[in-house]
Amino acid sequence: MLPFCHPGAFRSNRWTCCLQTDQAVQGCSRTHSAVTLGDWSDPLDPDAEAQLVYKQLLLHKDKLREKYQEISNTEAAREQSNTAKRASDKNQQRLTAAAHLLEVIQGLEQAHRAFEHQEGGEKPGTGTLPPP
């Protein structure tokens, strides 16, 4: 057992417990045999977690759109040649999921822009989306 540990998590390039920026730095709390893994908890920050998910969606939006176009083109070619129905069904499921995810990303972007407008000094309700 190590003599020191970090009771927090390494998030956003720093430890949440001691704010050290080096991930390999020695722990900030002494360990002891009385603590079990079930006792450990790291309070989640829902806003930070939602921002991480949003950031990942935005980073990969273009790649998702490219894959959607690729599958769509492949599906169109298969329909013309009447090949493999099973592959066609699977591709149709992928197309539907990708289209739905792209719609969700677009909705998130609109909501984000509306929030930025509200934070920028506009009166609530004057953004591109109605207030929640």
Image (spheres, rainbow, N blue to C red):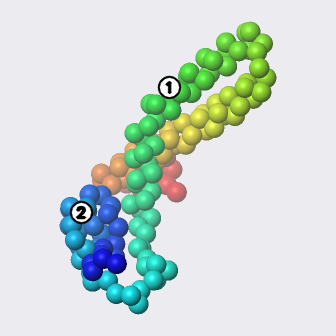
> What is the total number of numbered labels drawn onto the structure image?
2
Q: Residue at x 44, y 64 (%)?
A: 46
Horizontal side, residue 5 vs residue 62: left or right = left
Q: Tell me which corner region of the image, top left, top right, bottom left or bottom right, holds residue 6.
A: bottom left
Q: Quadrant of residue 20?
A: bottom left
- In the rendering, at what x and y percent does residue 120 appear? 30, 51
CA separation, marks 2 and 1? Answer: 38 Å
Report crowding for label 1: few under 14, some 14 to 19, many 20 or more residues within 10 A (C-alpha). Answer: few
Is 129 located above or below residue 5 in the figure?
above
Residue extending furthest toward the bottom = 34
Residue at the image point whose x is 56% and y is 27% from the top: 68
List x then y, in percent, for residue 89: 75, 29
* Residue at image point 27% right, 80% down: 3
**Mark 1 — residue?**
66
What residue would you read off at disc 2? 24
Contact flag, marks 2 and 1 (Cβ < 8 Å): no
For the residue marked with disc 1, what is the amino acid? Glu
Q: Is residue 15 left or right of residue 126?
A: left
In the rendering, at what x and y percent does residue 92 appear? 70, 29
Residue at the (39%, 60%) spot, across then down:
48
Q: Nearer the viewer, residue 16 or 53?
A: 16
Residue type for callout 2:
Ala
Residue 49 located left or right of residue 20: right
Q: Is residue 51 visible?
A: yes
Q: Is residue 13 above or below residue 42?
A: above
Q: Judge depth for marks 2 and 1 and give the one in front.
A: 2
